[in-house]
Amino acid sequence: MVNKTVNESTELEATGERFLPEMQGTIALEHLHRYALAKDCAAGKIVLDIACGEGYGSAVLAGTADRVYGVDIAPDAIAHARAIYQRPNLEYLVGECANIPLPDCAVDLVVSFETIEHHTEHEAMFAEIKRVLRPGGVMVMSSPDKLEYTERSGHANAYHVKELYAEEFQRLVERYFNRVAMLGQRVLYASAILPQGAPGEAVHYSRDKDSAIQAASGLVRPCYQVAIASDAALPPVLSSLFEQAGESDPEIHALQHQLEHAGRRILGLEEEVAGLKAAIELMMNSHSWKATRPLRAVANALRAVSGNRVEKSRRA
């Protein structure tokens, strides 16, 4: 259960990378979709969530798992998680990914989302994961693809100290596990996670800025790679979308605000037009307007005659 309002996580130090449950938009879709995927794999398992941050994702996993250990290097995040998310099957521990505070063969599932790019001890991290995993255990890990995340976007994340290309990430995982499935993730209209390069799977079509149509088995240019790995049979993972309610999207909020503002302007103009129409109608129905109607008719006739004479003189 959640004992306090989740927006108290805003009291934590803002690192620029820590996911908070109040977030909306692309970041929320990406993080929540990964945890939804892991939640399906966690049912009935003992789970380790590496770099759990303020604890929300670990609490999600605890909804189906037998037990969840959330580990993070930041003591303030762990203190917050312990205070906010309290379940009998959920425990938060201070620790590092290269020095996990659990005994050997302690867990069935290791979850690590958007962690590996924040440090350089990749080999030590995988060695620790293998140490705490039971035989036949499963790892679910995500990593941004350096090509898509940084090079093509032209955006360098100061918090990412060692990003990997998709092929590098896959080779690293395959050095430690006998069976590996790679999935791609990116936000389209919702977050999509699809198996990459598997024949018979979904084909994604996309038109680039030059109007050329691209196609790929899986996703075209996925921003993130998600690895599911084990030395035994891999759990079944379905292609999936994580949809965010439209009214919670910040861009849609902004458009709705503009629409409401325009609507108020239109309403004001309609009221102004109605007032002018009423004034005109009142004036036209007044006694003075009716009394001077014959004079206006004569004046209009004189203007018409005068206009005709001017026109004839111009022709002459």
Image: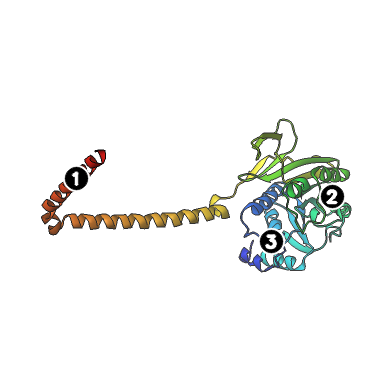
Percent of width and height locating residue 147: 77, 45
| Foreground of the two, 100 or 46 | 100
Q: What element carries label 1?
A: helix
* Amino acid type, label 1: Ala
The quarter of the picture where residue 160 lies is bottom right
Of the two numbered discs 3 and 1 in the rendering, the one whose residue sits closer to the viewer: 1
Can you tell which mark lies on residue 87? 3
Can you tell which mark lies on residue 136? none
Give the quarter of the figure containing the C terminus: top left
* Amino acid type, label 3: Arg
Mark 2, residue position? 134
Q: How far apart are labels 3 and 1 at the CA level?
A: 91 Å
Q: Which residue is drawn at 12% across and 53% down?
A: 295
Mark closest to the chain's N terminus, 2 or 1? 2
Give the quarter of the figure containing the N terminus: bottom right
Mark 1, residue position? 304
The answer to whether residue 300 is seen in the rendering is yes
